Image (cartoon, rainbow, N blue to C red):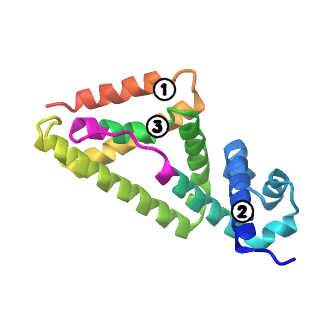
Amino acid sequence: MARTKGDHEARRRDVSEAVWRVLAAHGFSGLTLRAVATELGATTGLLTHYFPAKRDLVAYALDLLHERTAARPRRAAEQGRAAVRAALLDILPLTDEATASNRIWVSSWDTALSDPALGADYADKYGASRDRLAKLIATAQDLGELAPGDPSDLATAAQSFALGLVVQALFNPAAFPPEHQTALVDAYLAALAP
């Protein structure tokens, strides 16, 4: 019996979920065709239909991570300092889903650092994130809610602060529960007030 397009799409979704579960449990260092096949309850032969080489699996996992991160619900905030706050909180591991995504993202850094093409892609993604944050900061400055300064420099510092907090919260969640992370963001932004 011939496979239908729906069967192929269903199998691809199953593979995507298996890749995600392996990443969440073991990070990029544990992402292998064998691990995904085991998680899927399939053979590695089936997976090579989708991913002929580990590089293809890694590229797919990074795309999946980006898609899930982009699709994650975001906090609503009109504009000004509240919008900057919402953007920073959206980066942090404040929920189980955000924690899993951040664990996967941080574990992918080693892979991206060792592959020039992936590294360039990451640099572009971080740059786009800083640009969005700079626009929010510029609006908050125009409203008099943040002190003057170069919005690009402030966005770089804010992104660095948030990413550093992500790493600390992942390594020591007991010391950085969601309410403490939120309080740190609020203190950070209060220090930038005019």
Quarter in which the C terminus is drawn: top left
Image: 82 above or below 21: above
Q: Name the residue under label 3.
A: 92
Residue at x 71% of width, y 47% of height: 21
Q: Where is residue 14 in the image (x, y as percent from the top left)?
A: 73, 57
Image: 128 above or below 140: below
- Magenta region includes residue 27: no
* Local crowd size for mark 3, using a 10 Å CA cut-off: few (<14), some (14–19), many (≥20): many
| Relative horizontal placement of residue 100, taking residue 33 as reference (left or right) | left
Q: Position of residue 177 (x, y in %)?
A: 51, 23
Camera sees residue 161: no
| Relative horizontal placement of residue 43, taking residue 148 as reference (left or right) | right
Query: N-terminal of the two: label 3 or label 2?
Result: 2
Whole-number angstrom distance, CA of label 1 to CA of label 2: 35 Å
- The magenta segment is 69-84
Return the residue nearer the eye: 134 or 79.
79
Toward the bottom, the furthest residue is 2
For the residues bearing labels 3 and 1, Cβ distance under 8 angstroms: yes
Q: Mark 1 points at which residue?
A: 178
Whole-number angstrom distance, CA of label 3 to CA of label 2: 31 Å
SS under mark 3: loop
Amino acid, disc 2: Ala
Find residue 44 and report its image quarter: bottom right
Q: Name the residue under label 2.
A: 10
Residue at x 34% of width, y 38% of height: 86
Whole-number angstrom distance, CA of label 3 to CA of label 1: 8 Å
Amino acid, disc 1: Pro
Q: Nearer the viewer, mark 1 or mark 2?
A: 2
Query: N-terminal of the two: label 1 or label 2?
Result: 2
